[in-house]
Amino acid sequence: MIWTIHISVVLFVLISILAEMCFHEKLFKPLLRKKVLDHIQSNANMQRNASRMSIDDENGYSCGLYYSNWSPYSPRLHYPHDINLSQVSHIYYSFFLVDGETGTLKSSDEWSDFAMDIYKPLAIKLNKLNREDVDQELYAKNLPMGLIGELNFLRHSNVLGDKNAKDFKVIMSVGGWSNRQEFPKVVRDAKKFDKFIDSCVDTMFKYGFDGIDLDWEFPEDDGFEPQKYLEIVQNLRRKLDDLESDIFGGHSAGNHNRFHLSMATPGFAEKLNIMPIVEMNKHIDIWNMMTYDYYGEWSETTGYHSNLYDSGPQNEKVDMLYKYSHSSGSDERLCGNAAVTQMIEKFGVDSKKITLGMAAYGRGFKKVSANKTDTRFIDKAFHGVSGGSDGETGIWLYNQLPLGGSNEVFDPDYVSAFCFNPKSKTFVGYDNVDSVSVKTQYIKDMKLAGGFWWESCGDTHNDPSRSLVNTFVNEITSIKKFPNSMYHQSSVLKYYIKRYGAGGFLTSIFAQMIEAK
Ligand SMILES: *[C@@H]1O[C@H](CO)[C@@H](O)[C@H](O)[C@H]1NC(C)=O
Ligand SMILES: *[C@@H]1O[C@H](CO)[C@@H](O)[C@H](O)[C@H]1NC(C)=O
Ligand SMILES: *[C@@H]1O[C@H](CO)[C@@H](O)[C@H](O)[C@H]1NC(C)=O
C-alpha cells in the first residue's frame, strides 16, 4: 500500500514535470484534479433503499459537537482538522445570526466562515500525521476557503488518514445566546419572518449544510413568542421539503435524503413548559438538550452547572436572572435527568430523538464561603465568578482544568466533577471523564439518540485518556456515520451547480466530485 502510494507519487511528480514542460495547461490541470480527488472518494453504492425517515438513517449513536467560528482565534487555535472526526456524527456549526432589522440570516464572521486559508494549519497537521504522500499545494489551490470550506472538504475526504473520519453531517446553527434579542424583532413582522425562513434554507444549501439547528435562547412566556417559534419550525420544514422536491423531483415519493431540523433545547422545566413541544416534535428530528448552565454568575449560591442528578433541596433557591424571565417559584429541579424525563414522559418525545448535552467547560465561582472541613462546595455564598476562557465571564475550558493548586474530584451523587482552590477559594464545576462515563451509561439505559458537547474547542485534543469525546466514544462503541448523505448524491451536486452556477461557494469542488464518479 505504502509502496503503491510512493510509486504513484513519484510517477505523478515525473508526469507533472513533463507536463509542465510540454503541454502545461492542457495536461497539468486535469492531473491536479485527479490527485485531489484521490482523497475525495465518492460512494459507488449511492442508491440505497429508503428507510422511514431518510435514506441515510444509520445505526449507532449520535456524537455531536458544536464547533464555533471563533475557535481558530488565539488562545483556542482549534480547527476542524484538530477534531478526531471518526468519532463524530454531527458538527453543529455555530453561529449564523438573525438580523432583526431585515429578517435575513448573516454570517457572524465572514473571514473565518468563508475566507480564512486553513491549508497552512492543515499542512502542519498532515506533517504530524506523517502524510508525506499528500501534496499540500494541490489542496491550497483547489479547495474552498474558510472553516465551512474545510468542513465540506473533510467530510468527503480521507486526507486525515482514517477512513472513518469522513461522512459526518454538518448542521448550520442559527442564533445562540448573543443573538437572542433579534428573534423577537423578526417574529413580530410578517415580512421579516418570511425573509428569515427563505434566508435560512438558502444559506443552509448554499454553504453545503445538511440541516438547520435552531437556537433561540429563549422565547418569552407570553404565549406569542413560543407560538411563533413553532411557526418557524413548521415553515422551515415546509421550505426544506420544497427544496427536497426541487432537487429530487416529485416522483421519489419521499424516498430520498432529508435535510435535518434540530433544536438547541432548554434543559430546564421552566422554559420547556412554555414551548409547544408536542407540536414541534412533529417536525424536529433531534432535540439537543442543553443540560448545562444550571448555575453561574446569575445564581444566588454556587452549584454544579452540568449535573445529571440533583438530590438536594437547595436548588429551590436558584435565581436564574438571565434564563428565567418569570419565576414560577416552584421547586423545579435543575439537572439533566429532569429535563430528559420531562421530554419523554410529559411531552411524549421518542427518546431516540433526544441527545444529552454535555459541557466541555466549567463554571467558576470566586471567594466561596467554605471552611476546612467542607468536601462539597455547592450551595455556598460566593463573590464574583472566575473564568480562564477569553471573553466569557465565569467560564473555564475543560482543557484548562483542574485549576492549579487544586485536585479534580468526582461527585457521584450529582454526577459532576469539580475542583476547589483553597487559597483563592475558587470553585469550578464541570464534566470530566468520570461524569461522562456515567452519562454515557445513562444515554444507553434511557435509549437516547446520543450525546453532544458545547463546544469542541474545550475538550483535550492531545491526551485521549482525558478527552471527554474519546471517553464517550469508547464506552458507547458505535457512532452513526452517513456515507449516503445528501451531498454524496450526484443529483444534489448537479442541482447545486444549476442553482448557483460558477459563483456558488462549493460549485468547483462539487463539479470535481461529479467528474470523479
Ligand atoms: C429495496 O426494497 C424493496 C422493497 O422493500 C426490495 O424488494 C428490494 O429488493 C430492495 N432493494 C435493495 C437494493 O435492497
Ligand atoms: C480517533 O478515534 C478513533 C475511534 O475512536 C481511534 O481509533 C483513533 O485512535 C483516534 N485517533 C487519534 C489520533 O486519536
Ligand atoms: C464548616 O462547614 C460545615 C458545613 O458547611 C459546617 O457544618 C461547620 O459548622 C463549619 N465549620 C466552621 C468552623 O465554620
Image (spheres, rainbow, N blue to C red):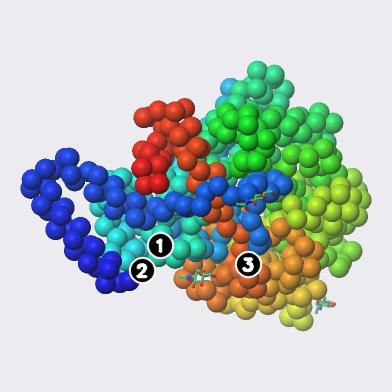
Pick the residue in front: 385 or 17. Answer: 17
Q: Residue at the location (40% across, 28% down)?
A: 501
- Label 3 residue near ligand 2, CB within 8 Å: no
Q: Position of residue 321 (x, y in %)?
A: 76, 46
Q: Are marks 1 and 2 in contact (CB under 8 Å)?
A: yes
Q: Residue at the location (87% across, 67% down)?
A: 312
Disc 1 vs disc 3: which is toward the camera? 3
Which image quarter: residue 299?
A: bottom right
Q: Is residue 53 above or below residue 431?
A: above
Q: Position of residue 219 (x, y in %)?
A: 76, 36
Q: Position of residue 190 (x, y in %)?
A: 69, 19
Q: Are marks 1 and 3 in contact (CB under 8 Å)?
A: no
Q: Residue at the location (61% across, 59% down)?
A: 480
| Residue 302 appears in view | no
Which image quarter: residue 193?
A: top right
Residue type pointed to by label 3: Ser
Pick the residue in front: 22 or 82. Answer: 22
Q: Position of residue 293 (x, y in %)?
A: 70, 55
Total numbered labels: 3
Residue type pointed to by label 1: Leu
Disc 3 vs disc 2: which is toward the camera? 3
Mark toward the start of the polypeptide (3 vs 2)? 2
Report whether 462 appears left or right of 204.
left
| Residue 514 appears in view | yes
- Residue identifier under label 2: 129
- Residue identifier under label 3: 478
- Residue identifier under label 1: 160
Q: Residue at the location (32% across, 71% down)?
A: 1
Report whether 366 appears left or right of 74.
right
Mark toward the start of the polypeptide (1 vs 2)? 2
Q: Is residue 317 above or below residue 99?
A: below
In whole angstroms, how far apart are the C-alphas of marks 3 and 2? Answer: 25 Å
